[in-house]
Amino acid sequence: MKRRLVFKLFIILLISTSLVIAQEESNQKIDDDPGITPDSPVWGIDRALERISLALTFDNQKKEEKRLIHAKERLLEVKAMLEEKNIEDAEKAEKAHEIIINLAKANIE
C-alpha cells in the first residue's frame, strides 16, 4: 500500500516538474549555457524531462521549436565536453543532437 502511494506521489511530482519545465522553456531565451552536461549523473533525467515536456506539447510548431532548443543545448554540451577534453561524453551529446535533428527534420517535412 505504501509503495503504491509513494509511486503515485513520484508520478505526480514528475508530471508537475515537467509542466514547470515546459512553461520555463517556452519563456526562456536560448543562451550559451549548456546547463546539465553528459558527465552529470542527472543528465539522463534532464533529457527524460525534455521528452516529457515534448509529449505534453500539443502544438506541432511549438514542439519543433522545443526540439530545436534541445538540439542547441546538445551542441553547447558537445562544446563544453570538448573544452574539458571529455571526448566520450561529447560523443554522447553529439549522438543525442543527431537524433533530435533527425526527428525535427522528419516532422517538418
Image: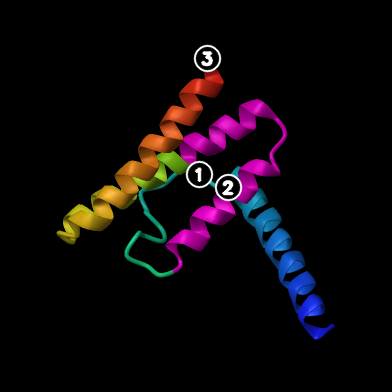
Label 3 belongs to which residue?
Answer: 109
Q: Amino acid at mark 1?
A: Lys
Q: Residue furthest left?
A: 85
Left or right of 89 in this view: 45: right
Q: Residue furthest top?
A: 109
Point out the stretch of residues depicted in magenta.
42-69
Mark with earlier residue (2, 1): 1
Q: Is residue 46 magenta?
A: yes
What residue is rendered at 43% in x and 28% in y? 102
Q: Nearer the viewer, residue 25 or 103?
A: 103
Assess whether mark 2 and mark 3 are in contact (beta carbons under 8 angstroms).
no
Mark with earlier residue (3, 1): 1
User: Counting other residues with Cα less than 10 Å from the Cα at mark 2, is it few (<14), some (14-19), or many (20 or more)?
Assistant: some
| Colour mapping | rainbow
Q: Amino acid at mark 3?
A: Glu
Compared with 29, 103 (above or below) is above
| Element marked by disc 2 | helix
Q: Position of residue 71 (x, y in %)?
A: 42, 39
Tally of numbered tags: 3
Assess whether mark 1 and mark 2 are in contact (beta carbons under 8 angstroms).
no
User: Counting other residues with Cα less than 10 Å from the Cα at mark 1, is it few (<14), some (14-19), or many (20 or more)?
Assistant: few
What residue is rendered at 73% in x and 65% in y? 11
Compared with 82, 67 (above or below) is above
Q: Amino acid at mark 2?
A: Arg
Label 2 belongs to which residue?
Answer: 51
> Which mark is on residue 29?
1
Assess whether mark 1 and mark 3 are in contact (beta carbons under 8 angstroms).
no
Q: Residues under labels 3 and 1: Cα distance? A: 26 Å
